[in-house]
């Protein structure tokens, strides 16, 4: 179905309420993984700037490749290891076939082809994070 409206259903909301007691532990685990990514990747890739006084939930670990070819090469090499990052904000919404009279959005079109989210979940093992970073650093 077409659309980008991401409202939760009643069932999804109920599941969310049932899991609220685990949210602090999940955020802590995601922070651990994020900190390890930061340590291993250093300044090798472009990362979003987090504004001061922002309380993060560590929901995603996006980074920007230099080119779409680099991003696709990273995806291919990770897939060989059964690791699947995902594209983030892709494609640029103005390029969707059902958007009529869309204007050119060169910045959005460019970055949407280069931004990815690395696997990030509370129980992601350190060895897997190191493996992911190893592949990324080969494409630097």
Image (cartoon, helix red, strand yellow):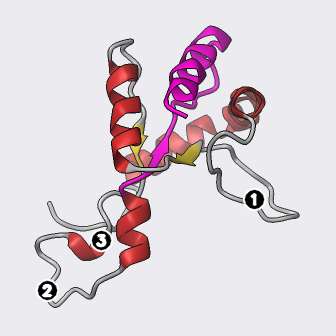
Residue matched to label 3: 93
Is residue 49 among the parts visible in the rendering?
A: yes
Rendered view: 138 above or below 52: above
Q: Please provide percent x and percent y for residue 118.
A: 52, 35
* 3D distance between C-alphas at marks 2 and 3: 11 Å
Q: To which residue does mark 1 refer? A: 50
Instruction: Work out how far the residue at label 1 is from the one at label 3, CA to CA, in angstroms.
Output: 24 Å
Residue 100's tag is 2
Sequence-earlier tag: 1 or 3: 1
Q: Quadrant of residue 41?
A: top right
Helix, strand or loop at mark 3: helix
Secondary structure of the residue carrying numbered label 1: loop
Residue 16 position (above or below residue 105): above
Considering every residue shown, the one lying at the far top of the view is 127
- Residue 135's tag is none
Q: How packed is label 3: few (under 14 Cα within 10 Å), some, or many (20 or more)?
A: some
Q: Are marks 2 and 3 in contact (CB under 8 Å)?
A: no
Q: For residue 122: magenta?
A: yes
N-term-proximal mark, 2 vs 1 = 1
Residues at circles 1 and 3 in contact by the CB criterion of under 8 Å: no
The quadrant in which residue 35 appears is top right
> Which residue is located at x 37 percent, y 77 percent?
106
Neighbour tally class for label 2: few under 14, some 14-19, many 20 plus, Cα within 10 Å: few
Q: Which residues are magenta?
A: 113-140
Q: Is residue 17 left or right of residue 7?
A: right
Q: Position of residue 51 (x, y in %)?
A: 79, 65
Residue 70 image offset from top left, x and y in percent: 40, 40
Which residue lies at the image location 49% right of the left edge and 49% below the top edge?
Answer: 66
């Amino acid at each position: 179905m077409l659309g980008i409206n991401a409202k939760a259903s009643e069932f999804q909301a109920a599941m969310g309420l049932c899991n609220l007691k685990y949210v602090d532990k999940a955020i802590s685990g995601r922070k651990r993984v994020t900190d390890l990514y930061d340590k291993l990747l250093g300044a090798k890739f472009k990362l979003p700037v987090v504004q001061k006084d922002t309380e993060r939930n560590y929901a995603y670990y996006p980074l920007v490749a230099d080119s779409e070819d680099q991003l696709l090469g990273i995806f291919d090499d990770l897939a060989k290891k059964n690791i699947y990052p995902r594209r983030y904000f892709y494609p640029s919404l103005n390029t969707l076939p059902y958007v009529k009279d869309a204007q050119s959005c060169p910045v959005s079109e460019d970055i949407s082809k280069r931004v990815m989210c690395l696997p990030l979940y509370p129980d992601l093992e350190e060895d897997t994070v190191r493996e992911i970073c190893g592949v990324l650093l080969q494409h630097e």
